[in-house]
Each structure stands twice: as structure tokens, then as C-alpha cells.
Amino acid sequence: MKKIRNSALIILAAAVLSSCSGLNKMVKNADEVAYSVTPEVLEMHGGEVDVAVEVTYPAKYFNKKAILTLTPVVKYAGGETELESIVVQGEDVTANNKVINYTTGGKEKASDSFDYSDEMMRSELFVKITGEAKGKTVQFEDVKLADGIIATPNLVMVNPKVLTFSDNFKRIVPEEYVTDIQYVINRADVRRSQTSKDGVVNMEEFLAEANANDRIEMKNLEISAYASPDGPYDFNDKLSVKRQKSADKYLKSTLRKKDISVADELFSLLTTAEDWEGFKKLMEKSDIQDKEMILRVLSMHSDPQVREQEIKNITAAFEEIKEKILPELRRSKFTVKVDKIGWSDDELKEIWSNDPGKLNLEELLYTATLVNDMETKAAIYKQAVKVSPKCLRAHNNLGWTQFKMGNFDAAESSFMAAKEIKDHDIINNNLGAVALVKEDVEKASELFTSSLGAGKEVNYNLGIVNIIDGDYNKALNYFGSEASYNKALAQYLNEDVDMSFRTAVNLTDETAKQYYLVAVIAAEQKKDDVALENLKVAVSKDASLKERAKKDLEFAELFESAEFKSIVE
């Protein structure tokens, strides 16, 4: 029995050694295994990194009793991220994994994606391999698969365009005053009862104010005299002229008495023998019996005598017309036209500084456009809100100023106050801009999409969203034909390298990011001198770009260049 036990131990030991020996042989010959990674250098798009790893085992390599677990892992300063494992097994293993044939070899592939973080920019992709056979485990040496991570999409400028409402300020405001005096039938004398009417008295006051106020310029004083369309035309023609003369005489006499000066060339004197147009307007507003029939007569006949006779034939209606319509047409109409001259730009700014309460809403909204200092601009818009709390333009434009000052919370509050007054595309675009700078890309996209009616600025904002989301072709569609830094970036990310270079080098912004992007594109084009020259300018404008350049694999082929090192150190 003792011998039997010793024999069993020998057989067990041999089996263990055989299994370990098989794994050890796989470890020893691990360099015969081939790996491929797509992409060869890891890239970030839409905030994520996609990677596919394929492993190929040669013939007579894979132990029939072995299970290998291959775990891709991204290693970077401060941490590592494990990806989905690949598990393969030999022919004699009964588990449910991909089988690698010992005689012919085989391959397996796995794809995964992971969220990108900035510390991953300079990183490496390894695969950790654990082998198992008969309950024994062997750790293989880690194999480096790829470098990473190119994060050029993060160069996007999150500079959404916010919009303002325009003011309605007009420096010259035309204004007119209209009144009339009426006459007794077939007469042309101006009666005192007419000149004492409120309308005529107010006209005299209007003329007096225009004469005394340097900011009111008289443009025209028109007298139009009319006769009603009843009776002989020749008589009415002469009567309208008499009425025009009496009205002119009355007005000029009044101007002299009140010492109001109006140049002769500003007077216009007009007459209308039979006021059919006035007749039609009054008839349309009336409730006179057979009104529609009378209006049809006017439309069917143009001859004054025929019109008059046809209307007189409608006996009952004509009696009402004589009482309600015709007396209103026996008149002289006065039309005073003036221009009110508003404050000049300098005057508005001076009033803001010394007496802001003197400015009305439109003057405030306009004055805000005259100043460049954002604090002052915000103060003017706050005053506009105070003057008109229900004006969405004042709230929105205050929000615009706060946004430009980087005070996004205050801007959001102002935009929301405007939205409560009225839902408007401009306001929704601006709320989208706030969401975007606060990194709520989904909300920003929804708001921009709902506000496309606000103009091309919304398209630009959606272009930014689509760069962030990794859809570069869609971003280019939104950017359209207008050149911009973000358009150049989208062209590069969409692999239109030459066009992106042309766009980028012709921009007039001359920002640090622009020069950095040109350096990236030039490096891709193997224009090393151009890349280094632009990188040097970029870091001179923004020294923080040195740290990025040190890790940026777009410059991988320049890392060992003495000039590159001197630029980034």
C-alpha cells in the first residue's frame, strides 16, 4: 500500500510539472505572439477613447490545457485603467472561451472604449497576461501595445456666440400733428367755434413749442382744403380754393400774433374739389343703411356726377349721408410735420455720467452700445432693467454683458428673467451658451437646436457642440463657409489636413491656440520648421501650452529635437 501511495504522488507531481512546464514554455516563447492595435496611437474623440486589440497565436504555441486572460490596461501618471479582457483557451479545456488550436494557432479580438481624462494624455497601452492550467497560475510579463493619447479635439475653443437685442433709439424722430376746421355748406369763412376747438388750440401749442425748442425742427406745414362731393364740380372746385385761402389766412395771422416763425417755403397748400376718398373712408366706418350698395357704386363708377346721382337715387341712405357724412368733408386740414432731434452720442454719455435718471429705456439701450468698459455697460443695462422691468431686451443684454465678463451664473439669471417675459430664440441660444461653458453639452445642444431661428451664430455654436461630440463632418456643415479657428480644427480632425492648414494660417485672430493648431497641422504635414516656428509663438503667448506640447503625441517625431526641447522647457 505504501508503494502504491508513492506511485500516486509521483504521477500527481508529474502532472503538475507538466502543466507548469506548458505554461512556462508559453511564457518563454511569448515573443512569438503577435498583437495589433487599432488605432496604432490611441486617440480621443467625443470624450472617449476607442481601442481594438487583436492577438495572434502561432502554430504549436498554445498549450492544450491552458487558459490565458489578457487584460489591456492604460497606464498613466497617477493611475491606470483596465479594459475588457480577452480570454482564450486550449483545445482540452472545457470552459466556454475562444479555443486556440495547438496545431494551427489562431487569433482573438476585443474592442472597448473608455472615458478620457487629461492625465491620460501621455500614456501607454499594455496588456497584462495571466495563464492558468490545472489550477496553477503564471503571470506573463506585460506587453506594451501602443502609445497614447492624442487629444487634439480638446483644442476646441468653447467660445459660443451670445446675442443681443437691438435698441429702437432714433436720434431724429419724425412727428406730425393733424387737426382740421369745418365749414358750413357752400361757405368758406373760418368760424370762431372751429378755431377754439381743442384740436386747433393744441396745434397752436405744438407750433409754439416747435418754434421755441432747438431740438425740434419744422419740416412742413400743410393746408389741405376740401369740398364735399355734392353739387356741381366747378362750384366745389372754386369753393375748395376759397377754403384753402381762408385757412391759410387764419393760420398765418395766428402765427404772427403768437410770434411763431415758419418759413414760407415750408407751407404746402392743397385743394380737393370733391373729396370722394374721404367719403369712402367715412362710409366704410359708418352704420348707414345700404352702406354696401353705396360702396359698390363708388367702385363701379369713376365719374363724379354719375356717382353723385346714383347715390342720390338711394333716397333713404342719402338723407343719412347728408347728416352724418357730408358735413365732415367740408373742411381744411392742417398737418404740421417736425423732426425731434435727440441727444448726440457724446451728450448721451455725459448724461449717463451726470444724470442717468434723465434717460429713457431706448436711450439707455443705445447708450450701452457706445461704451467699451464692461462694468459701465452692465451698469447701464441694470438701469434699463430698473426703468423697464418687463423689457426682455434689457434683461437679455445685461446677461450678454455678464457672459462676456465671465460671470456665467449672473448671465444665466438675467437670461432666465428675459425668458420669463417671453420665450425667444435669441434667449434660448444664450442659455445654451451658458450651458456649454458650464460643460452641460447635452442641454446646450437642445437649446441651440430649438433656437435656430436666431441666426448663423447658433450654427456656429452647434459646430462647437459637434466637435465636442466627435462628429467633425457635422460640425463643418454647421460652420458653413465662414472661416474660424474651430472650423480649421474640425477640418483637421476630419482629415482634411491641407484645407485646415490654409484656413488656420489665414485667420486674423492670432491667438495662442491658433499658432498651436498651425504647429500641430504642420507637424502632421512633416513641415518641421513651420511646426517649431508656430509652436514657439504659441507658447510665447500662452506659457501653459508648454506642458501640453511636452505630452502631445502630435509632436512625437519632434520630441528629441533640440529646438523642440528648448521651446517647451
Image (cartoon, rainbow, N blue to C red):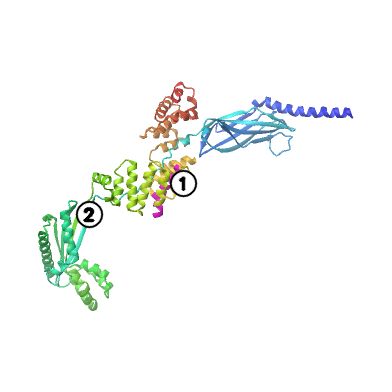
Q: Count neighbours of disc 2 (C-alpha within 10 A) and say few if under 14, some if 14 to 19, many if 20 or more.
A: some
Q: Is residue 311 magenta?
A: no
Q: Is residue 367 above or below residue 519?
A: below
User: Residue 482 at what x, y percent from top left?
Assistant: 38, 40
Residue at left 28%, top 52%?
360
- Three-letter amino acid code of the residue under disc 1: Ser
| 395 relative to 80 in the view: left or right | left
Magenta segment boundaries in residue numbering: 418-437
Residue placed under numbered mark 2 in the picture: 174
Rendering quarter of residue 60: top right
Q: Position of residue 206 (x, y in %)?
A: 18, 59
Residue denoted by label 1: 445
Q: In front: 175, or 412?
A: 412
Picture quadrant of residue 180: bottom left
**Residue 250 higher or lower than 99, as above or below:** below
**Which secondary structure is most common in the magenta stretch?**
helix
**Residue 273 visible somewhere in the drawing:** no
Quarter of the image where the C terminus is located? top left
Q: Residues under labels 2 and 1: Cα distance? A: 44 Å
